[in-house]
Amino acid sequence: MNTKLTLTIDESVIKRAKAYAEMQGRSLSAVVENYLKAVTKIEKKNDEEFSPSLKNLIGSVKLPKDFDYKKIRDEYLTEKYVSND
């Protein structure tokens, strides 16, 4: 079932989006709908990757905004696997 949706978007963005849709041979509504399908599919996929136990832990630890988990992980793996001979 299709439902009408009213959006408020900057005029210049609308013009570019209409031109893009025309180049793709689709309506602007189809472009927006496909985008929203893709975005919601990605979010749903990411949500399904977490076990219920892990979902319960989300938000329980507060980390600094500048926390770099990749750096911490790399330091840990370097310490674990590189010998200090």
Image: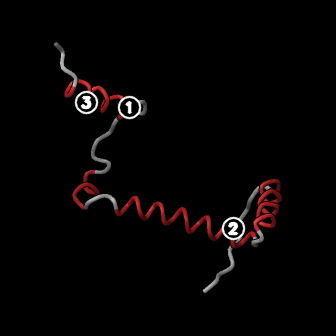
| Horizontal relation, residue 49 to residue 85: left or right | right
Separation (CA) of disc 1 from disc 2: 37 Å
- Residue pictured at 35% horizontal, 34% vertical: 69
At mark 2, the secondary structure is helix
Q: Position of residue 40 (x, y in %)?
A: 51, 65
Task: Estimate the x, y position of residue 15 in percent, counting from the top left.
Answer: 83, 59
Check the picture and name the quadrant holding the C terminus: top left
Neighbor class of circle 2 (other Cα within 10 Å; few <14, some 14-19, many 20+) is some
Query: Marks 2 and 3, how far apart in space?
Result: 44 Å
Q: CA distance from mark 1 to mark 3?
A: 17 Å
Q: Secondary structure at mark 1?
A: loop
Find disc 2 in the rendering and name its residue.
Answer: 31
Residue drawn at (29%, 26%), measured in percent from left and top?
A: 75
Question: What secondary structure is marked by label 3?
Answer: helix
Which circle's residue, 1 or 3, is located before the other in the chain? 1
Q: Which circle marks residue 54 in the picture? A: none
| Farthest bottom residue in view | 1
Point out the tag, 2 or 3, that comes first from the N-terminus. 2
Graded by Cα atoms within 10 Å as few (under 14), some (14 to 19) or many (20 or more), the crowding at tag 3 reads few
Classify residue 6 by image quadrant.
bottom right
Look at label 1 and name its amino acid.
Phe
Q: Where does the image place residue 36, in percent across and percent down from the top left?
A: 59, 66
Are the two marked residues, 1 and 3, in contact with CB atoms closer than 8 angstroms? no
Quarter occupied by the N terminus:
bottom right
Rendering quarter of residue 66: top left
Q: Is residue 67 left or right of residue 76?
A: right
Kind of residue indicated by mark 2: Val
Q: Which residue is mark 1?
A: 67
**Kind of residue at badge 3:** Leu
- The residue labelled by disc 3 is 77
Which dot, 2 or 3, sits closer to the camera?
Answer: 3
